[in-house]
Amino acid sequence: MKLDVRSVNLSASDPINQYVDQKLAAAVGRFFDHVRAVTVHLTNAREPHRGADPRCQVCIRLINGSQFCIQDQEPDLYSAINHAMSRLKRTLSRRIERQRDRKRHPAE
């Protein structure tokens, strides 16, 4: 799995990068073999002079070629990462289960 963490208008320190890695590992977990690449974008949604409004966007590409993005915006960067990773885990689980169901019960 290829992982790319990018930050725009935001300083992503080592603790933040480690936190993203930790949360991503927990979110992807048992579906690791289905994931080809993950890109995490950490940005400040507001203009710099208006204060911080951090956004976390996670784009994931699966082995079967499908891809999707999850985005969350919170007052705190860690909260944005938490919520985005929670949503990623639910969405990834749902997509993989649908894929498995299609293989088990093909349309007749």
Image (spheres, rainbow, N blue to C red):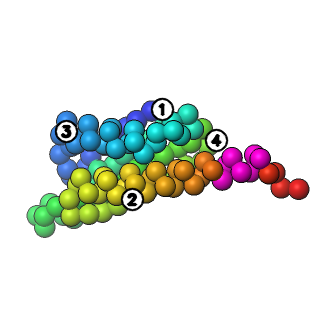
User: Where does the image place residue 4, in percent across and percent down from the top left?
Assistant: 37, 37
The three-letter code of the residue at mark 1 reads Met
Q: Quadrant of residue 33?
A: top right
User: Which tag, 1 or 3, sits closer to the chain's start?
Assistant: 1
Q: Are marks 1 and 3 in contact (CB under 8 Å)?
A: no
Structural distance between the alpha carbons of marks 1 and 3: 21 Å
Tell me the quarter of the image containing the C terminus: bottom right
User: Which tag, 4 or 3, sits closer to the chain's start?
Assistant: 3
Query: Which residue does the image show at 26% across and 57% down from the upper left?
Result: 79
What is the magenta range?
Answer: 98-104
User: Where does the image place residue 95, in percent across and percent down from the top left?
Assistant: 59, 52
User: Which label sits on residue 71?
Assistant: 2
Structural distance between the alpha carbons of marks 1 and 4: 13 Å
* Label 3 crowd (10 A; few <14 / some 14-19 / many >=20): few
- Is residue 100 on the magenta stretch? yes
Query: Which residue does the image show at 43% across and 57% down from the upper left?
Result: 87
User: Which label sits on residue 15?
Assistant: 3
Q: Would you name the residue on which mark 4 appears?
A: 64
Q: Are marks 1 and 2 in contact (CB under 8 Å)?
A: no
Q: Quadrant of residue 64?
A: top right
User: Which label sits on residue 1?
Assistant: 1
* Labels 4, 3: front one: 3
